[in-house]
Image (spheres, grey):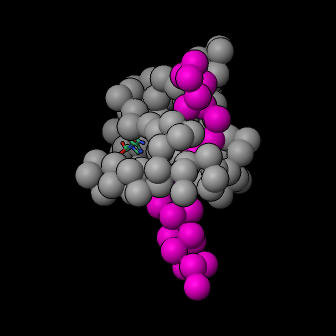
Amino acid sequence: KLVRDILSRPPIVAKQNISIEEAARILTEKNINHLPIVDEEGRLIGIVTSWDIARAVAQNINSICEIMTKHVISSTLDEPIDVVARKMSRYDISGVPVIDKSGKVVGVVTAEDLSKLLGNRK
Ligand code: SAM
């Protein structure tokens, strides 16, 4: 199976000018833990998780740019899902944004998606 077969779309993304509170609201209201941050063209420039929000609160930081991880581990639509699983375990992350050829975010694959896939297998 490839990433494109299991992708949840459309992706929930945000721009870097949103506040920490807005990011926290998106994560809780949409029941997600990975929020890709994109530029005006929808291209990936960072990622924010609830861990980063916790850090913002702990260290009294008020800007997304300061808390987002800028070196994002991502995947492409044609990547096999076991490659994605290995990336998550190697980098100690639980989700990767999926980008198309132009760098636009087209979805997110999470460890939850992968475990559901294994759980459904007969
Ligand atoms: N193991 C936990 C998890 O999987 O969510 C937490 C540890 S993880 C190292 C926390 C950090 O990883 C956060 O600062 C977050 O921004 C970052 N992170 C999450 N997904 C990422 C990804 N796909 N690429 C780069 N960094 C990512």
Residue extending farthest to the left is: 90
Q: Position of residue 81 (x, y in %)?
A: 47, 54
Residue at 51 percent across and 36 percent down: it is 76
Give residue 67's position: percent from left, percent from top: 40, 32
Q: Position of residue 18 (x, y in %)?
A: 61, 27
Residue 50 at least partly seen: no
Residue located 66% across and 45% down the image: 26
Viewer-proximal residue, 56 or 120? Answer: 120
Which percent across, then down, holds residue 52?
41, 43
Side of 20 relative to 60 (left or right): right
Span shown in magenta: 97-122
In which quadrant is the N terminus drawn? bottom right
For the C terminus, the quadrant is: bottom right
75 horizontally vs 21: left or right: left
Q: Is residue 121 above or below residue 54?
A: below
Asked which quadrant contains residue 65, the reply is: top left
Asked if the stretch drawn in magenta spans residue 103, the answer is: yes
Residue under the point 26% across and 52% down: 90
In-image side of 82 versus 32 (left or right): left
